[in-house]
Image: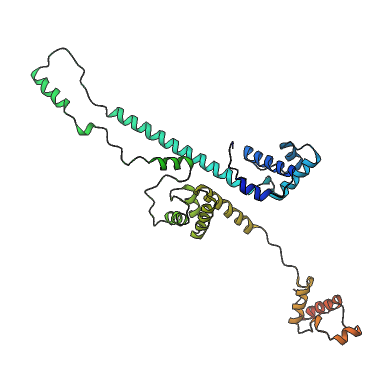
Amino acid sequence: MNFYKHHLGDYAAATSHLSWDEDCAYRRLIDQYYKRETPIPVDVKEACRLVRAATPSQRRAVEAVLREFFRLNPDGWHQNRCNEEIGFANAQAETNRRIAEERESKKRARKEHESLHAPLNEPSTNRSPAPTESVNLARLQTPDTRLQTPEIQGAQPDVTTSRALVEGEVEPENPAEGAGTRYGLAAKAMRQRGCAANPGDPRLRTLVDQGASIEEFEALGAEAADKGKGPAWALTALVNRRQEAADTRLAPQAAAPPWHESRDGVSARAQQLGMQAWPDFTNDAIRKGTTPSWSAYRNQVIMAAADKGTTR
């Protein structure tokens, strides 16, 4: 990427606590992130070399910024905002490429049609035509509506629509998609929240096919409208967040510790066995020192559970 939006207010609010070196390190790190379109290298020394951090204080600033504003993955240090903007830029480039190809294809088809249906004109000659030939020439000079170039159907988009297509704020309309389809309902949900989505957008269609709910489209549409973003940003953000949620669900869950390794587990098992709870001994017994220690009480519960055959 050779360009990205820099919102001064958002940046100042998020970085007001940084030192001069840390602010410089952060700006250089995100510049490299957008320029390379890849995460910052895992090795902090390599990251320092990438942003030309030479002094010890500059290197410490790079490490502090990485740990605060980035997250470490096996392939490098990731930054969520940079990932979203790069995804938006790539999607916009693909949209622009597709629009350009369609425009060139229509232009070639129009030229081929005009060349095949050019008017038929007889070459001029100096000899006088025979009486029979004059009839034929008169017939040929009469316009034949079958040979005329057909009028191109559909009005050309106005200036506002053309500018929006170039800037990626809307996708070309797809007449085949009615308002009652799943794609139409998803686009309508986003439009009702102020985000002009289109049911023909391939990203929207993919999300609908993957099971994204109407509530998700409504929430992202409202968030995009609040931030002044377009549908491309909203759909890219929804793809990223659904992927993060899927990664979280797939993460292995830690197994619960055995009951005898926690105080709550021992107390619950004692209650099941009908034993006196450890904190319930009388104050007199506590003063006389006859109250068993927690370790001794725990061993009593474990032995009682073993006698009952309920050690698990």
Relative horizontal placement of residue 304, taking residue 122 as reference (left or right): right
Q: In which quarter of the image is the C terminus?
A: bottom right
Residue at image position (61%, 54%) is: 244
Answer above or below: position of 300 versus 42: below
Q: Where is residue 36 in the image (x, y as percent from the top left)?
A: 64, 38
- Pick out the residue farthest to the left: 131
Residue 211 rendering spot, x and y as whole percentages: 51, 57
**Which quadrant of the structure image shows residue 113?**
top left
Q: In the image shown, does 253 or 236 lie closer to the viewer?
A: 236
* Residue that appears at 77% across and 78% down: 267
Is 53 above or below relative to 127? Answer: below
Instruction: Name the outermost residue toward the right.
Output: 288
Q: Residue at x 51, y 56 (%)?
A: 222
How many numbered marks does the figure carry? Answer: 0
Q: In which quarter of the image is the N terminus?
A: top right
Quarter-wise, where is residue 291 in the image? bottom right
Towards the viewer: 133 or 172:
172
Inspect this view and state whether residue 309 appears: no
Above or below 63: residue 112: above
Extreme-top residue of the structure: 126
Q: Is residue 146 left or right of residue 35?
A: left
Image coordinates of residue 37 in percent, x first then y, are 62, 40
Whole-percent x, y for residue 95 in the image: 48, 41
Task: Kindly tell me whether residue 44 is visible in this rendering.
Answer: yes
On screen, residue 103 above or below 195: above
